[in-house]
Image (cartoon, rainbow, N blue to C red):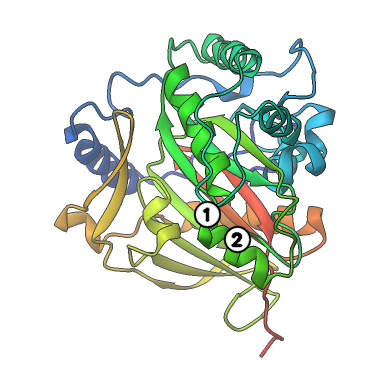
Amino acid sequence: MGSVGSGQEWKSGAIYAREHDQRASEMRTVQDGVEGFAGGAAFRRYDWERTMTTGVETETEILWLGETACHDRALVGGKAAQLSRLAAGYRVPPGFCLTSTAFAAARSNGHAGTGIGGQPVVLPPSLFGKLTAAYQTLAARSGLEAPPVAVRSSAIDEDGSAASFAGQHDTYLNIAGIDAVAEAVIRCWASFSSERALAYRRQQGLPLDTVRPAVLIQHLVVADVSAVVFSANPVTGKRDEIVLNATWGLGESLVSGTVTPDTYLVRKTDLTVTGREIGDKQRMTVAIPEGTREVDVPRLLRRQPALDDAQAIEMAQLARLLDEAMGYPVDVECAFSGGRLYLLQCRPITRLPASK
């Protein structure tokens, strides 16, 4: 297997079996059948590895993944800070973050409400201009006039050892065009004051009056297969066993629990697949104009494995490397797109039982 080095290339050589390529091709046919699907012929993937942050001006309201300042969770939140640190060594989609400073400035100018349902109406003109400039930079790097992006909330006290905030704040996928991106930012801000998010903060004993949201904007990976990988078994607590849950398409069906995924068990010491259970994957999330849609998986693909063993091992290797680098068991979101594995998120496993 290939090893993680500079982040320019770390996939294994010819690990993608022909039969899996055929299944992925059939899955893309389903996606392309959805009118205007962003992953079809109109969507042109570009070389992520050639996208660099060098030369981007650093300031306090917008920071780029990979910049040293973007490693500061007090500015960009746990999710974005973690990805920024990992961007140099792993295939992380390029992007930038609207910092907690940006939110504070908007709130001080009366543009951002923080009460329940207190949704800001517009971004301050100065911040909208900076957001526009950053999005245009991302567009120039991608070669697309209006690149599709994922717009994700990133809480300052998120993804720590005690509280992960997984699923508590909003995420918007396949957003294209600056006006749509700005609207998604506003909705992410508003989600921090939702009843669900506030209830979680109360449960975790966190203050309600010091919420400082940041928002991460990354080029969208149009996934053929998405997975959540645990570097320790979250059910048995075994630290020497890696668990993968995988399904077709974007990861929203997986993280929302609307699909029964495939499950793989991999021994951590030698990355041997020791078990697999192929789920009846009836639903999948695909990209459509201005967002995503959950659709039926074709019957021929429902009981077909989303990953071959080599791909499962590559995902397990990624989780093991991150486990070793972080010094604790991790919960990793990742995806294969066009034969390449992308790291989308990495956070601690917050509740791991004693090993049985």
Residue at 67%, 83% (x, y): give it.
353
Residue 265 percent across, percent down from the top left: 52, 71
Residue 102 versus residue 15 in the image, above or below: above
The amino acid on which the numbered mark 2 sits, given as a three-letter code, is Leu
Query: Based on the displayed image, in which of its 4 quarters is residue 94 positioned?
Result: top right
Residue at 72%, 48% (x, y): give it.
78
- For the question of whether residue 233 can be seen, the reply is yes
Label 2 sits on residue: 198
Give the crowd class for mark 2: few <14, some 14-19, many >=20 residues within 10 Å: some
Give the crowd class for mark 1: few <14, some 14-19, many >=20 residues within 10 Å: many
The amino acid on which the numbered mark 1 sits, given as a three-letter code, is Ser
Q: Which mark is residue 194?
A: 1
Residue 161 percent across, percent down from the top left: 76, 64
Residue extending furthest bottom? 356
- For the question of whether residue 92 can be seen, the reply is no
Residue at 43%, 10% (x, y): give it.
145
Name the quarter where the C terminus is drawn: bottom right
Residue extending furthest front? 110
**Viewer-nearest residue: 228 or 137:** 137
86 with respect to 226 (left or right): right
Mark 1 to mark 2 CA distance (whole Å): 6 Å
